[in-house]
Image: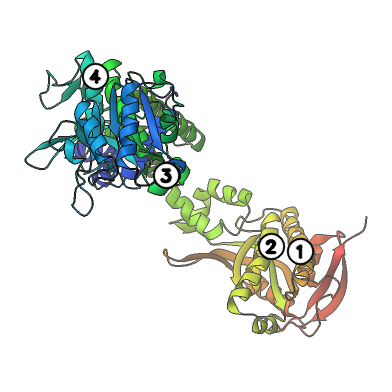
């Protein structure tokens, strides 16, 4: 039993367990459809990355434009359609598909239209299998019950994007052919090519030498998608290029060269935007109207793909089975866990993350080039999440100790001081908290003059914004001068110079005192700068007082493990506070808006570096013994 427990304490074993846990969570999210939108976006991006090819020259479009509507009327009369079909027949188009609803005759010319439809078996007409209200749209009466009819229903994904084409649909009793399939079959009939069952799987269909696997509800990135009928994934080969196209008027006025349509697939429909017959595709990178394609263009894409199956041996887009996809995602999650285990340093981790994701992206791209759709989003997330989780686990104990120290110091000291504390943590920490120690340090207090009056003039939100701007500026100055911000007390700041490490020489104590005074002088310059900005903005200006004193004190942590605070106590703290508040009736220096008072003990450590003048020996509030007080004017001239 101990050996088993010992194995589970092995970091590598825990790393693999965490990788499997990440895999299980990702798989659960995927099964609920959480990644479907991202996976479909990745699929679209992959289609757009494929090398561009020209549009299929076998497909020609005859389009009704807005100009045609004004010239020929809407809906276009039966007689006009008859003349268009007659002209295309004369030009020897191999197959003609009409993507215009004509369940109700539009006189004049019904007789002429019926006549040409009866005479020409290569003219196919569109029908609607089912509308949203449950009603269907019939083809022209003369074609009802013939094989010259196909439905034009499309299956769109969330967002309205068409990624799948339909070959068949059924109503439980009869099987119906799609409009693009009927066109392709009629076009391929002279070559003796038709749909056949796949020899290896009777549920699959073949077109020529190419097997067309039927779409299943969980194929690729889909989760519980509508898989009704016989669907297949569209490749949109040739996009964003357009099929060759002519207008109704150009055809009727003889401006179309017969060779342009001879022996071609001709699809008749509309490109008039007012008729709203357009769709989004994977090449629609936004939702703008200019990024959609018209219905006849979409039919042309599907017809082209079916024809390429048969004539060019272009492979259908295939997907792995669900178990293979799960194994793929598991592999990347485990790989991420191993990377997190071996490459915990940030630089190595970032390099490994970039390199491995580049490999995954390349694998997905080359698979797409070979007409395979493999998952890329869940593996990428599995890799990254597992790597980060394991790296976090491996450094957990270290981070717990660091968290205690950083909670106490990170926002109050410079980066150098924080790092020094961290590297000396074993000497500095005792039972999970900083050791208490007696040392000599310099304490600095600041306070704003007349803050109560100012706060009464401002609304709470403005007051807090104004005060935070001031505090942020002062805090940065303290940290820059190697001080520790011990606490904020309303509008006051308490900072210590000389902690958390006890100074071992008089020179170090003197340097702390100088840093405190330099910090106060920098605060004075900053207050002048801020006042100029606030005055220009019509805001209140301020003055401040600073008290500085050097002496012995005790530093340590107070509070519980849940709420721990590093602080200092002792008479030195009280004296510095009293110096700041001494004789409030005397305003701060009106020229620089900041009064700086120091005690005689601090002056002893400053030498002749600063210009000061004596305020006098005074008994500070709450203190029986008088101390010498000096005001700091500035840096001494050389």
In the rendered image, which residue does mark 1 sit on? 526
In the rendered image, which residue does mark 2 sit on? 473
- Circle 4 packing at 10 Å, graded few (<14), some (14-19), many (20+), is many
Q: CA distance from mark 3 to mark 2?
A: 70 Å
Disc ID at residue 188: 4
Instruction: Give the x, y percent position of residue 255.
Output: 46, 27
Q: Is residue 326 visible?
A: no
Instruction: State the residue in front, 304 or 219.
Output: 304
Instruction: Give the x, y percent position of residue 372.
Output: 30, 26
Instruction: State the residue in front, 321 or 558.
Output: 321
Q: CA distance from mark 1 to mark 2?
A: 7 Å
Q: CA distance from mark 3 to mark 1?
A: 73 Å
Comes first in the chain, label 3 or label 4 = 3
Q: CA distance from mark 4 to mark 2?
A: 78 Å
Pointers 1 and 2 in contact (CB under 8 A)? Answer: yes
Comes first in the chain, label 1 or label 4 = 4
Q: Is residue 560 visible?
A: yes
Task: Point out the frontmost of discs 4 and 2.
Answer: 4
Task: Point out the frontmost of discs 3 and 2.
Answer: 3
Residue at 69%, 55% (x, y): give it: 480
Examine the image and state in which quarter residue 331 appears: top left
Disc ID at residue 69: 3
Which residue sits furthest right? 638
| Quarter of the figure with the C terminus | bottom right
Residue at 64%, 69% (x, y): give it: 494
Q: In this rendering, would 240 be left or right of 85?
A: right
Comes first in the chain, label 3 or label 1 = 3
């Amino acid at each position: 039993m101990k050996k088993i427990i010992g194995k589970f304490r092995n970091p590598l074993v825990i790393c693999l367990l965490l990788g499997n846990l990440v895999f299980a969570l990702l798989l659960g999210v995927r099964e609920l459809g959480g990644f479907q939108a991202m996976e479909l976006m990745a699929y679209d991006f992959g289609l757009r990355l494929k090398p561009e090819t020209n549009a299929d020259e076998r497909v020609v479009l005859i389009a009704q434009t807005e100009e045609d509507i004004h010239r020929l009327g809407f809906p276009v009369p039966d007689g006009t359609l008859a003349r268009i079909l007659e002209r295309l027949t004369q030009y020897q188009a191999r197959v003609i598909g009409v993507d215009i609803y004509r369940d109700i005759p539009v006189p004049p010319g019904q007789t002429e239209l019926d006549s040409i439809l009866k005479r020409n078996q290569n003219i196919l007409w569109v029908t609607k299998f089912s509308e949203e209200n449950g009603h269907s749209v019939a083809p022209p009466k003369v074609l009802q019950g013939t094989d010259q009819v196909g439905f034009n229903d499309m299956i769109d994904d969330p967002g309205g994007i068409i990624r799948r084409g339909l070959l068949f649909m059924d109503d439980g009793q009869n099987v119906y052919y799609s409009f693009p399939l009927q066109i392709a079959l009629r076009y391929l009939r002279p070559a003796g090519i038709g749909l056949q069952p796949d020899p290896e799987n009777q549920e699959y269909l073949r077109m020529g030498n190419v097997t067309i696997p039927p779409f299943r509800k969980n194929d690729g990135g889909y989760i519980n998608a509508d898989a009704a009928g016989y669907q297949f994934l569209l490749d949109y080969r040739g996009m964003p290029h357009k099929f060759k196209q002519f207008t109704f008027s150009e055809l009727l006025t003889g401006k179309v060269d017969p060779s342009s349509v001879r022996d071609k697939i001709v699809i008749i429909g509309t490109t008039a935007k007012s008729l709203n017959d357009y769709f989004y595709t994977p090449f629609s990178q936004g939702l703008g109207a200019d990024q959609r394609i018209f219905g006849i263009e979409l039919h042309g894409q599907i017809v082209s793909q079916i024809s390429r199956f048969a004539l060019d041996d272009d492979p259908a887009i295939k997907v792995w089975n669900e178990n293979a996809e799960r194994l793929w995602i598991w592999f990347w999650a485990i790989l991420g866990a191993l990377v997190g285990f071996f490459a915990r340093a940030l630089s190595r981790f970032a390099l490994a993350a970039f390199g491995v994701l580049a490999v995954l992206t390349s694998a997905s791209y080359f698979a797409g080039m070979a007409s395979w759709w493999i998952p890329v989003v869940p593996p990428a997330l599995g890799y990254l999440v597992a790597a980060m989780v394991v790296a976090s686990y491996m450094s957990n104990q270290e981070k717990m100790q660091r968290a205690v120290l950083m909670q106490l110091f990170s926002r109050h000291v410079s980066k150098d001081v924080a790092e020094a504390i961290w590297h000396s943590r074993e000497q500095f920490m005792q039972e999970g908290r900083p050791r208490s120690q007696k040392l000599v340090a310099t304490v600095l207090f600041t306070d704003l003059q007349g803050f109560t009056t100012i706060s009464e003039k401002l609304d709470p939100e403005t007051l807090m914004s104004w005060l935070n701007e001031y505090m942020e500026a002062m805090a940065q100055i303290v940290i820059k001068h190697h001080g520790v911000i011990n606490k904020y007390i309303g509008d006051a700041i308490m900072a210590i110079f000389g902690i958390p490490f006890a100074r071992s020489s008089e020179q170090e104590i003197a340097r702390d005192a100088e840093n405190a005074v330099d910090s106060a002088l920098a605060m004075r310059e900053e207050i002048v700068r801020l006042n100029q900005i606030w005055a220009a903005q019509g805001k209140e200006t301020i003055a401040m007082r600073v008290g500085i004193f050097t002496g012995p004190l005790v530093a340590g942590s107070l509070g519980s493990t849940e709420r721990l605070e590093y602080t200092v106590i002792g008479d030195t703290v009280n004296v510095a506070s009293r110096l700041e508040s001494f004789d409030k009736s005397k305003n701060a220096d009106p020229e620089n808006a900041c009064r700086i008072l120091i005690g005689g003990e601090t002056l002893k450590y400053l030498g002749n570096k600063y210009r000061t003048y004596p305020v006098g020996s005074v008994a500070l509030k709450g203190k029986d013994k008088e101390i010498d007080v000096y005001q700091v004017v500035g840096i001494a001239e050389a």
